Image (cartoon, coloured by chain):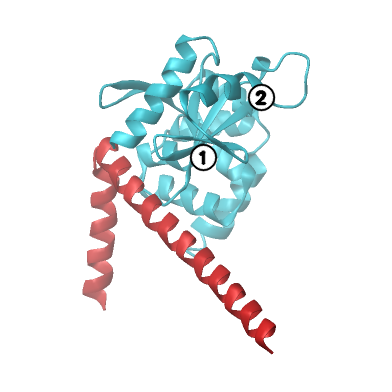
Amino acid sequence: MKETQDALAVINEMRDAGVISKYAIGGAVAATFYIEPTATFDIDIFIPFENVPGSSLVSLDHIYNYLTPLGHKSQGAHFIIGGWQVQFLPADDALYGEALSQAVEIQVGRVKTWVMTAEHLMAIALRTGRAKDFIRTEQFIRYNKFDAKKLDEILDRHGLVEKWRQFNDKYIRSGK
Amino acid sequence: MEKILADKIEERKRLVSLPFEEKLTLMEKMRDRSLLIRRSAVATVSEAAVESEELHAHK
């Protein structure tokens, strides 16, 4: 846990220094807060899209300029922090934006951090639609780690009701 | 077989109920193991490529 804690401490320092503003952990690491741990190489950190003024692209310059002098190397789209490949991703649409704004504050050892809610992780997984996303969604259901009413509202708001119905027909009701 | 499957289900339930910190420790171990396998695979491929090149050079 120490490596993750160290990585999150660095990300919090970036927040304190104004390099990024609010952030939320998404992806496999966030899902693990609720369900089974899974193998992953990276920590996905979602940041507000307005961190990139006047551009439709994500500029990592300010992040790069902060992390590199501290000895954190970049590797493709990732930065190596505390043994993890950390990827900074823009919350660049309504669903990601909402997931970021409603992220839950948690404690990892001595470090405070934020993870996306189970319902937002499910909605994002449903929309992304890779095999591993469906496995993740099935686990949230199997272990009853979500609020059905809250999920319904999110799915409705973001036009994912039909995808949810298809997912249920294919993987849940059929018992596959 | 049923016993094995039942044990597996129980183990997965146990993993879900672990504190987040303990799950992260497991994830760090899984990540390190996966990285080791990935590096080992890359190294093996690279070694095979060198060996192949050397073989061709000697022909």
**Residue drawn where x is 34% and y is 23% of the image:** A106
Q: Which mark is residue A94?
A: 2
| Chain that is red in the image | B
Subunit bearing disc 2: A
Number of marks drawn: 2
> Could you confirm whether marks 1 and 2 are on the same chain?
yes
| Chain that is cyan in the image | A
The one of A18 and B45 positioned closer to us in this rendering: B45
x%, y% of residue A66?
A: 54, 19
x%, y% of residue A15?
A: 48, 14
Q: Is residue B32 left or right of residue A160?
A: left
Q: Are marks 1 and 2 in contact (CB under 8 Å)?
A: no
Mark 1 Cα shell of 10 Å, populated few (<14), some (14-19), many (≥20): many
Q: Residue A73, relative to residue B39: is it above or below?
A: above
x%, y% of residue A97?
A: 61, 22
Q: Quadrant of residue A90?
A: top right
Name the N-terminal-most of marks 1 and 2: 2
Indicate the secondary structure of the residue bearing disc 1: helix
What residue would you read off at disc 1?
A: A122
Q: Which quadrant of the figure contains the N terminus of chain A? A: top left
Mark yes or no: residue A105 visible.
Answer: no
Q: Amino acid at mark 2?
A: Ala
Q: Is residue A74 left or right of residue A9?
A: right
Q: Amino acid at mark 1?
A: Met
Q: Is residue A160 left or right of residue B13?
A: right
